[in-house]
Amino acid sequence: MQEWWMSLDVFMKSLWIIALFSSLVFIVQTVLTFAGADSDVNTDLDFGGDTPADGFQLAQYFTFRNFINFFLGFSWSAIAFSHSIQNTWLLLAVAVLTGLILVSAVMYLFKWLSGMEQTGNISIRDATGCTGIVYLTIPEGRTGEGKVQIAVQGAIREYNAVTDGEKLANGAPIRMKKVLTDTLLLIEKQY
């Protein structure tokens, strides 16, 4: 083992050190991720300029996890191709490309997985067109608020409500017509 290490040039020793260190950190990150701990340290880099919140933000790519993934792909691919690619610059180009591909693949995987996440919350906007009953009497013509119980996505939810029509007594069947605010619905009697 010692003879093998001594036979390596500085470039290959550097690649092996990077590969072993990034592999160790990657394993720790993976264990912490599956254990439920947040092992990603994001940097708050300011690259100047105003970027819209939903637009392209360069800082989202500069995370500790992405750096580790890049060096993992870079170092191991350089080691793997070192016997078949003798030109150092070509070897570095292939290694950089492999590192970037690995980072892109991992980012896509995490984005795909986070898209499958569900909060279990039901938005008031999901109630449009749903039916239910009056829970607390609703005065006529938007002169006051009452309460309704509406079935939204298979769950019964209670909302504040007003109506444009006649007074609606407790137990009256209703249909949700429109969302007025984040806490108030416009309903109508269901016939």
Image: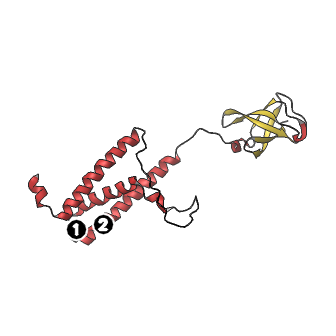
| Badge 2 amino acid | Val
Asked if residue 83 shows in the view, the reply is no
The one nearer the camera, 191 or 112, is 112
Residue 142 in view: yes
* Residue sitting at x 77%, y 41%: 184
Work out whether residue 59 or residue 135 is closer to the camera in this orientation and state it. Answer: 59
* Residue corresponding to mark 1: 85
Name the residue located 30 percent from the left edge and 53 percent from the top edge: 22
Q: Earlier in the sequence, mark 1 or mark 2?
A: 1
Please state the horizontal and vertical placement of residue 67, each as a whole percent of the image.
37, 57
Q: In this view, does 51 lie above or below 123?
A: below
Q: Which amino acid does label 1 sit on?
A: Ile
191 or 96: nearer the viewer: 96
- Callout 1 touching callout 2 (CB < 8 Å): yes
What residue appears at the point 20 percent right and 62 percent down from the top-left corner? 12
x, y percentage for residue 36? 43, 39
Of the pair 148 and 63, the residue shown nearer to us: 63
| Res 75 → quadrant | bottom left
Q: CA gap, disc 1 to disc 2?
A: 9 Å
Question: Disc 2 marks which residue?
Answer: 94
Label 1: few (<14), some (14–19) or many (≥20) C-alpha neighbours in 10 Å? some
Q: Secondary structure beneath disc 1?
A: loop
- Image point 39% across, 57% down: which residue? 103
